[in-house]
Image (tube, rainbow, N blue to C red):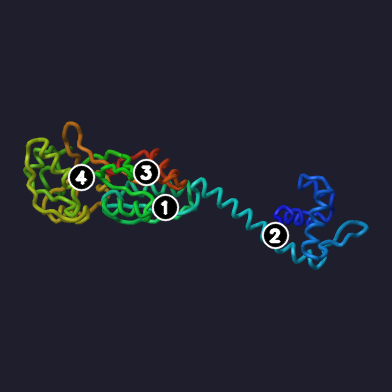
């Protein structure tokens, strides 16, 4: 059954007048009459009784009208969903996350995207950079966030933010009285590094800051993640260099101070995605990422 004919039938069933129905359908009356006749011939039954003062639905017409409204409603809904999907407004966004970034920047990005696209389901996956790249290639991820990722032929790596570095230290430590801590001063303190399971990674980046100054870090412990590292700082095991976002992690007795150097030390926060992924959802999310305006994660928290 032709959908155009079904729509014409539904409008005529509402108007019960060929002239008014034709006006609503933006066609002349003869084509509408032919459409209804074709439907009745196809079904082998009359849909309307022709009365002196207009039309009336037959039993078959009443039954068909209920189904026609459901069918036309489904067609309209399918059109709307296809249009929304084409604009990236519905569907699923699988996001790879890691460590310290989840404390501040990534949640803000995701909240901003969700406010713009509330019908997109967001799923988070905590993965290392190696796992993220593999998941992207296997199409289990839409986009990942990480640090120190090298571009590959099939993977785009795009910088989101260059994040300042801070020093986490016990509040009773003498250096906590300073506005900032130099790498020279830090080299004289026991240092806690993380993560200890990824190379090349953030721990290597921290060590390179000492190497650049011709200094050697006094590494006391290497642990798996920022939470463990800052917890050990809270317990007095040593000091720890963290990205600014990690200052959102407030543990008893821990304060954060800027790491002082020239130029000011930073670490990259990047997103990575498949080079051949032209999906509307990824395009919409990347637009949010590129318009992202970071605010200091440590504002009001460095004390």
User: Which residue is under mark 3?
Assistant: 275
Q: Residue drawn at (16%, 55%), measured in percent from left and top?
A: 223
User: Which residue is under mark 2?
Assistant: 69
Q: Do the residues labelled 2 and 1 touch (CB within 8 Å)?
A: no
Q: Residue 297: name its quadrant.
A: top left
Determine the secondary structure under disc 3.
loop
Q: Position of residue 214 (x, y in %)?
A: 7, 36
Q: Residue drawn at (13%, 48%), measured in percent from left and top?
A: 239
The label shown at residue 211 is: none
- Along the horizontal axis of the image, is 268 left or right of 293? left
* Circle nearer the N terminus (4, 1): 1
Q: Residue 69: name its quadrant.
A: bottom right
Q: Residue drawn at (71%, 60%), measured in percent from left and top?
A: 68
- In the rendered picture of this protein, how many numbered marks are placed on residues? 4
* Circle nearer the N terminus (2, 1): 2
Q: Where is residue 194 in the image (x, y as percent from the top left)?
A: 17, 51
Which of 112 and 63 lies nearest the eye of the viewer? 63
Number of residues whose C-alpha sits closer than 10 Å to that of mark 3, classed few (under 14), some (14–19) or many (20 or more): few
Of badges 3 and 2, the one in the foreground is: 3
How far apart are the alpha carbons under marks 4 and 2? 63 Å
User: Which residue is under mark 1?
Assistant: 93
Determine the secondary structure under disc 1.
strand
- Along the horizontal axis of the image, is 206 left or right of 14? left
Residue most toward the top?
262
Vertical placement of 205 versus 194: above or below? above
**Rendered-image quadrant of the N terminus:** bottom right
How far apart are the alpha carbons under marks 3 and 1? 16 Å
User: Which residue is under mark 4?
Assistant: 256
How far apart are the alpha carbons under marks 3 and 4? 38 Å
* Circle nearer the N terminus (3, 2): 2
């Amino acid at each position: 059954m032709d959908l155009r004919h079904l729509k014409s039938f539904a409008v005529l069933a509402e108007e019960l007048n060929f002239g008014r129905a034709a006006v609503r359908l933006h066609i002349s009356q003869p084509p509408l009459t032919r459409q209804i006749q074709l439907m009745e011939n196809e079904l082998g039954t009359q849909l309307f009784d022709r009365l002196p003062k207009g039309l009336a639905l037959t039993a078959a017409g009443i039954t068909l009208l209920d189904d026609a409204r459901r069918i036309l409603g489904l067609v309209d809904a399918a059109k709307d969903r296809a249009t929304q999907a084409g604009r990236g407004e519905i569907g699923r966004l699988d996001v790879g996350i890691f460590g310290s970034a989840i404390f501040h920047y990534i949640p803000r990005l995701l909240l901003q995207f969700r406010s713009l696209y509330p019908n997109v389901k967001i799923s988070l996956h905590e993965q290392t950079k190696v796992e993220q790249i593999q998941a992207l290639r296997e199409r289990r991820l839409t986009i990942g966030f990480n640090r120190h990722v090298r571009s590959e032929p099939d993977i785009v790596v795009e910088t989101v933010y260059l994040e300042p570095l801070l020093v986490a230290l016990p509040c009773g430590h003498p250096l906590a009285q300073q506005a900032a801590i130099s790498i020279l001063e830090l080299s004289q303190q026991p240092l806690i590094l993380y993560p200890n399971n990824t190379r090349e990674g953030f721990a290597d980046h921290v060590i390179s800051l000492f190497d650049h100054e011709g200094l050697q870090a006094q590494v006391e412990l290497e642990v798996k993640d920022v939470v463990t590292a800052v917890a050990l700082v809270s317990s007095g095991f040593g000091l720890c260099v963290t990205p600014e976002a990690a200052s959102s992690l407030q543990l008893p007795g821990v304060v954060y101070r800027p790491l002082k150097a020239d130029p000011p030390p930073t670490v990259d926060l990047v997103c990575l995605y498949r080079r051949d992924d032209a999906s509307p959802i990824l395009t919409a999310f990347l637009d949010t990422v590129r318009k992202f305006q970071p605010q200091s994660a440590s504002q009001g928290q460095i004390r």
